[in-house]
Amino acid sequence: MLSQLRELYSLLTSDQRRRLLRLQGLIIIMAFAEIASVIAIGPFMAVVGDMSRLQGEGWLAQAYGWSGVGSPERFLTLLGASVLAIMLMAALFSMYTTWRLSLYGARVGAELSSRLYRYYLYQPWLYHAGGSSSRLINRVSQEVQRVTTKVINPFMQLNAKLVMVTCMSITIFVYNPKVAATGIVIFILSYLLLYKTVRRFLVANGRRVSRFQAKRFKLMTEGFGGIKDLLLLRRQATFTRQFDKASQQVARGQGVSQGLSEAPRYAIEMVAFGSVILLVLYLLNAHQGNLGTILPALSIYALAGFKMLPAYQKIYSSISHIRSNLAAYETIRDDLVASCSHAEAEVRGNDEALPPLVAKTSIRFDDVHFHYPGKRLPALNGLSLEIPVGARVGLVGESGSGKSTAVDLLLGLIHPQQGRILVDEVALDEATLPRWQAGIGFVPQHIFLADATVLENVAFGVPREEIDVARAQEAVRMAQLESLLASLPEGLETHVGERGVQLSGGQRQRIGIARALYRDAQVLVLDEATSALDGITEQRVMDDIDAIAGGKTLVMVAHRLTTVKECDMIYMLDKGRVTDSGTYDELVAHNHTFRMMANL
Ligand SMILES: Nc1ncnc2c1ncn2[C@@H]1O[C@H](COP(=O)(O)OP(=O)(O)OP(=O)(O)O)[C@@H](O)[C@H]1O
């Protein structure tokens, strides 16, 4: 546990560590304030037990004389008020420190969550293509939340209470070593015994919560994401059954952990009461039953115990919480570690401002190979093709022939493992990619629509106040969206609903096209972009794209060969390489497979 906490500490930024150090100062002051409030009760009780102390030699008598208060009773009242004042100040300071500790924990949690979110957003395409978004969402929200409330916050409490208990123990030890040592040993042994008994349960529970929490998230993402299929197939019961089971497991894990961290309090209270009785008997015996002598000591021990008992309980419950939730930290540890060295990636992200790399003559795939990790066969196996600037180029081929992979390479989302992609004679690499991507527009097969207005979806990712409305209107017009907008109550400002469920497939795709046109890219890549449009609309969209494309380079992946009919050049792909090329008519004339694909 300690090594994991040390590791977590090493993940803090220097600013977070500085703030932690400052808090440590507050914690130490808080411990001294608590001690002062405990010790202050001693003189008061001494006078309560034996008023004659105010006469004679002792420091209490001196204080009484110095105060100038007329009667011992009034002096006692004054003493009581002072003790209360000291306790009040200590309590206020403790409240303030606890508040600062909670705030610190929450803030560190929020920063870790932001750091992870940023880290995931900057991961390359293959990272996302191979994983599941529900897993990432679960980590950024749930697991970080668990680390915050069940590891960092308890650690801060643990830290504060440990300092307090240590300082208090030293003080009462100085006061009476024998009594203090016995009391401290009794408490520590009791808690250690309890902790050793439940530790294994805590760890197992923590892992169970992590596992089933992730499952719940998966079921939520899949359930809501695929709601249409779910409704149609009437499979809700399968999902709800699994969700119920996972929820029960999470609840059980959390409940048991909570119970295991709280329950020992009652056992320890018994130990505490037993100790007080023993202490009274011991003190009465040691001081021949003189209540006046034992009252101050008894009050100090009782008050110290009163303060330390909850502190011990807090230390114990904090350790239990940390133990049972370190599994959450383990799930995000690697990503957190990796996110530390991430600043440089972020710099790479701000590329919008760079002047785009514009091709003047051609874009060329030169013997490009690409193999997805874990796949037996390569997706691209020596792909060579040329896209002349200003031309309309189609990529066709059977499913799995490598068209989308070629597009991802062209977009710079993945990189050739062998061979090169050349823009004129400049090879795409780490240095040139940002500029290349700044000048390329992409319309995917499945358009993601944000739960926002049409305008915000067209200018996806651009802050609301920076959106160029005139440009968006122009893009919308070119994507044949005007008639749709005219029918919407608020036009461009109409909300499209999460994932665009209020729009038809074709309308969604046209928003995607408008999004690509909004960027004013010189190269437009359309991956099955018009597959959801009816023939007439597709023709209109393509004519329009043609019109606005004037000079732009178009790369189109299509199953429907009518889409690529007008292309200047069509490449036929099979098993990751080009098997034939030519115009539509040329291919119809000499390629049997193409003729079959075209249903001719
Ligand atoms: N993210 C991925 N991880 C692993 N393998 C992948 C991934 N994407 C594609 N592949 C594999 O790479 C090969 C080429 O796939 P690709 O999607 O490029 O073909 P495609 O011609 O675009 O197919 P379709 O027309 O069905 O979209 C296929 O065997 C596919 O299984």
Image (cartoon, helix red, strand yellow):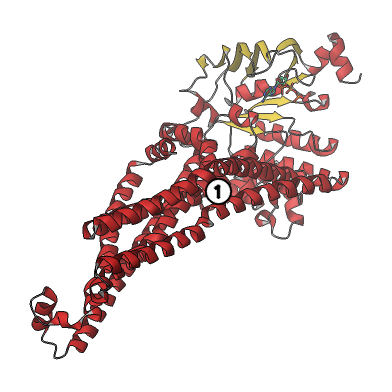
Up-down: is 254 above or below 303?
Answer: above
Is residue 368 visible to us here?
A: yes
Tag 1's secondary structure? loop
Q: Pinpoint residue 496: horizontal percent, then vertical percent.
A: 70, 52
Q: Pinpoint residue 329: horizontal percent, then vertical percent.
A: 51, 40
**Toward which corner of the image does residue 557 lie, by quadrant?**
top right
Up-down: is 104 above or below 458?
Answer: below
> At 49% from the left edge and 52% from the top edge, which residue is drawn?
149
Q: Pinpoint residue 357: horizontal percent, then vertical percent.
A: 50, 26
* Name of the residue lying farthest toward the right: 600
Give 567 or 503, whichever is nearer the viewer.
503
Is residue 517 visible to us here?
A: no
- Badge 1 amino acid: Asp
Q: Which residue is mark 1?
A: 468
Up-down: is 172 above or below 327?
Answer: below
Q: Pinpoint residue 495: horizontal percent, then vertical percent.
A: 68, 55
For the N terminus, the quadrant is top left
For the C terminus, the quadrant is top right
Give 551 or 483, whichever is nearer the viewer.
483
> At 21% from the left edge and 57% from the top edge, which residue is drawn?
174
**Toward which corner of the image does residue 474 lie, by quadrant?**
top right
Q: Which quadrant of the frame does ligand 1 lie within?
A: top right
Up-down: is 499 above or below 55?
Answer: above
Give 419 or 570, whichever is nearer the viewer.
419
Judged left or right of residue 555, residue 193 is: left
